[in-house]
Image: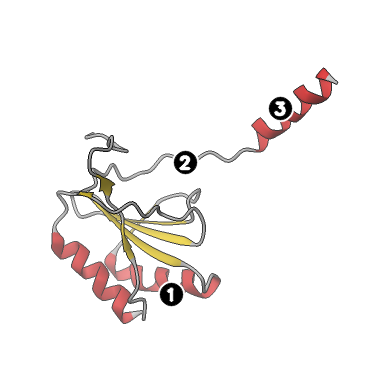
Amino acid sequence: MVDVAFLLLIFFMSTTQFKPPEEAKLELPESTSEMKLPESDVMVLAIDRDGKLFCRVGATGTEQATSMADLEQAVVAARIRNPRLRLAIKADRDADFGAVSDIMEVLQRTGNTRFNMVTLLENAEPIVGKP
């Protein structure tokens, strides 16, 4: 019986998917919203303080650097693959608002007028510290 328990433990440990490290180190702005970012059916568009744009589909997907020119095609392709896909913008608190505005314009052109802004709860520990 102990052998079976250890085999099950080893099986679950070896098949577990861990969250991959994020390329963009972000320091999120604070808010009082308590809505959590969904684990599946989500596309996260991240902007670091230097204005670099990263795209990730799903909570366990890998973050890929992209450009504003390629963002429209990436959003349309992701929505075609998964029509229930929700969009979230995750911007560093020191990121230029112009970059965030550009992303919102791309989302509007692609017909995605509903999206979430990812923030850090007030009085919460930062997810990613300053690099």
Q: Residues within 10 Å of mark 1 (few under 14, many from 20)?
A: some
* Residue pointed to by mark 3: 10
Q: Nearer the viewer, residue 97 or 72?
A: 97
Residue at coordinates 42% horizontally, 61% vertically from top-left?
Answer: 43
Judged left or right of residue 118, residue 96 is left
> Is 121 or 96 nearer to us in this picture?
121
Q: Which residue is mark 2?
A: 20
Q: Amino acid at mark 1?
A: Val
Which residue is pictured at 24% across the width and 50% down the height?
A: 48
Q: CA distance from mark 1 to mark 3?
A: 40 Å
State the CA–CA distance, disc 3 to disc 2: 21 Å
Q: Do we see residue 53 in this rendering? A: no
Say what secondary structure mark 3 lies in.
Answer: helix
N-term-proximal mark, 1 vs 3: 3
The C terminus, quarter of image: top left
x then y, percent, for residue 8: 76, 30
**Count of numbered circles in the view:** 3
Expressed as whole percent of the image width and height from the top left, the position of residue 54 reads 34, 55
Residue at image mark 1: 76
Looking at the picture, which amino acid does disc 3 mark?
Answer: Ile
Instruction: Identify the amino acid type marked 2.
Output: Pro
Secondary structure at badge 2 equals loop
Check contact, mark 2 vs mark 1: CB within 8 A. no
> What is the x, y in percent for residue 72?
35, 73
Quarter of the rendering occupied by the N terminus: top right
Give the residue at x 46% y 49%.
Answer: 62
The Cα–Cα distance between marks 2 and 1, rounded to whole angstroms, is 24 Å
Q: Secondary structure at mark 1?
A: helix
